[in-house]
Amino acid sequence: MIGALALVHERALILQVFAYGDTSKILKLLCENHGVRTVIAKGARRPRGRFGGLLEPFTEGDVQFSLKEGREMHTLSGFDLTRGRQSLGRNLVAFAGASLLAELALRFGTDEPQTELFGLVSRELDRLGSVAADAAPGVAFAGVWQVISLLGYEPRLDACVGCGREILPGEATRFDIEAGGVAGVECRPEGRLIDTQTRMEVAAMCAGDAPQSEATDWRLHRSLLRAFVSSHLTQEHPLRSLDLFLDLLP
């Protein structure tokens, strides 16, 4: 049943943009208090349209749209720009990382209030927009692991997922993807060993800290993230931006 019409006025991020007809755009928004919503911006593709060139992915602003519960698409009536983030287009790794963050938010966000997710994605997009090129992989990884953790899938890294024993400093472990964390070699005698540095880097990224060591093993991080996301978040419906991001890493 379709509810009454209400005017929404709040902060929102544009996650995706699609052309609609000859003159309009469809936007996928992450709203601070109304979650993920789909709106149509009528006339947005006209050269002299009222929205100009503002309605692009990763742009943030104060939106106004008419919301009618029970409908999947709503009508955008206003957009006041607060962050453009054009700088993301100058760094391919940062752009791919931003695309992955946006796709995660779109895939797993709901139409309920998404205050924490909104704040996290907004902050990480800002970080990616200002990061130096050589630091972009670490910042992007940290953003992705933070979103994964916020969604409830944070890997267990301080204790063995098999027996619960605390992992000792300097101890090599194996990453048990299906169990969602690291395991001692006595519990998982087979599989790829994960060195202490990599384990601590993943833990730091879940807390928002990007790796800064020249010895960071990006090939291992790439393998771990791909396997973890595929096992716990996407399964039969992979994220299109995941491979793009991972294939760009050093």
Image (cartoon, helix red, strand yellow):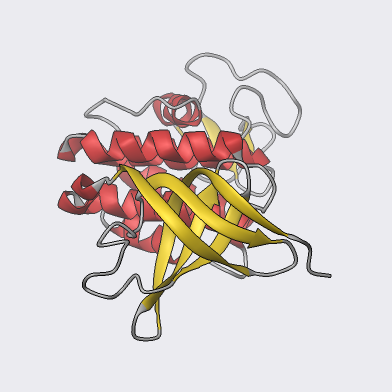
Can residue 154 be seen at all in this image of the molecule?
Answer: no
Q: Quadrant of residue 116?
A: top right
Q: Looking at the image, which residue is at 47% across and 60% down?
A: 77
Vertically, is 149 above or below 224?
above
Q: Quadrant of residue 180?
A: top right
Q: Looking at the image, which residue is at 66% across and 23% down?
A: 159
- Residue nearer the viewer, 223 or 2: 2
The quarter of the picture where the N terminus appears is: bottom right
Taking the image as shown, residue 119 lies to the left or right of residue 182, namely left
Taking the image as shown, residue 67 lies to the left or right of residue 226, namely right
Q: How many marks?
A: 0
Taking the image as shown, residue 58 lies to the left or right of residue 109, namely left
- Residue nearer the viewer, 49 or 22: 49
Where is residue 146 shown, x and y percent of the image? 51, 35
Q: Looking at the image, which residue is at 56% across and 41% down?
A: 32
Where is residue 87 shown, x and y percent of the image? 19, 46
